[in-house]
Image (cartoon, rainbow, N blue to C red):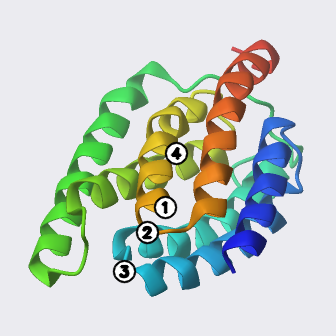
């Protein structure tokens, strides 16, 4: 499962980097695999994020194709996140981190509730930003990937840790590419 999930994840991040529509089908498949993996290793916040990722992938596919949130029904271009959203995005990340940390401590199931909660919160906000095609979504992944590398290495899921290390490189390349292609 670890190797298959990592392979699907690499297809996903390459598709994301290229802003290809194929990122959404690969995201659906990756979310399904990592729901199972995270449940197995007891990373429940990240497991819940995989379920969220599955659902937001459907939403993102519809937004990117212009089927929702578009009067013209055309593909959405890469854009900058409006400045008025940043306080809300940072607040959401903080609140999600605290809620996940509290729930994980309450359940006493996670070995690293702060890291599990923070990576889950960054994932929620990052995937929403990706669904909106904001180039700054890469910044959220830039922070979360090292956390996920540590989590997966500490639980023996080496292929997944390597995948997230590769993601970190794609974050830097993605920031450059998407910012150049953004309309604002």
In this view of the protein, which residue sits in the foreground, 51 or 40? 40
Question: Would you name the residue on which mark 4 appears?
Answer: 126
Q: Earlier in the sequence, mark 2 or mark 4?
A: 4
- Label 4, label 1: how far apart the Cα atoms are: 19 Å
* Mark closer to the observer (4, 3): 3
Q: Which residue is depicted at the point 87% across and 37% down?
A: 18
* Mark closer to the observer (4, 1): 1
* Mark closer to the observer (3, 2): 2
Residue 152 tag number: 1
Q: Which residue is depicted at the point 61% across and 64% down?
A: 56
- Label 4, label 3: how far apart the Cα atoms are: 22 Å
Question: Would you name the residue on which mark 3 appears?
Answer: 42
Q: Could you tell me if the residues under marks 2 and 1 are in contact, i.e. CB atoms within 8 Å?
A: yes
In this view of the protein, which residue sits in the foreground, 29 or 21? 29
Quadrant of the image containing the C terminus: top right
User: How many residues crowd around disc 2 within 10 Å: few (fewer than 14), some, or many (20 or more)?
Assistant: few
Q: Position of residue 65 (x, y in %)?
A: 85, 52
- Label 3, label 1: how far apart the Cα atoms are: 11 Å
Question: Would you name the residue on which mark 2 appears?
Answer: 155
Q: Earlier in the sequence, mark 3 or mark 2?
A: 3
Q: Earlier in the sequence, mark 4 or mark 1?
A: 4
* Mark closer to the observer (2, 4): 2
Q: Earlier in the sequence, mark 3 or mark 1?
A: 3
Q: Which residue is depicted at the point 43% across and 80% down?
A: 41
- Label 2, label 1: how far apart the Cα atoms are: 5 Å
- Label 2, label 4: how far apart the Cα atoms are: 24 Å
Q: Position of residue 1 (x, y in %)?
A: 69, 81
């Amino acid at each position: 499962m670890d190797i298959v999930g990592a392979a699907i994840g690499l297809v996903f991040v390459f598709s994301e980097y290229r802003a290809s529509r194929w990122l959404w089908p690969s995201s659906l498949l990756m979310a399904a695999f990592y729901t199972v993996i995270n449940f197995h290793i007891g990373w429940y916040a990240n497991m819940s994020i995989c379920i969220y990722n599955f659902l937001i992938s459907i939403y993102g596919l519809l937004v990117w194709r212009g089927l929702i949130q578009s009067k013209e029904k055309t593909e959405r271009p890469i854009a900058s996140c409006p400045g008025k959203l940043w306080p809300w995005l940072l607040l959401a990340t903080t609140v999600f981190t605290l809620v996940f940390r509290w729930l994980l401590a309450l359940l006493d199931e996670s070995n690293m509730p702060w890291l599990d909660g923070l990576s889950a919160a960054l994932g929620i906000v990052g995937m929403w930003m990706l669904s909106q095609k904001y180039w700054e979504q890469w910044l959220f992944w830039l922070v979360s990937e090292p956390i996920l590398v540590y989590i997966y290495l500490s639980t023996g899921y080496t292929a997944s840790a390597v995948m997230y290390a590769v993601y970190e490189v794609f974050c830097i390349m993605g920031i450059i590419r998407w910012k150049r292609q953004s309309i604002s």
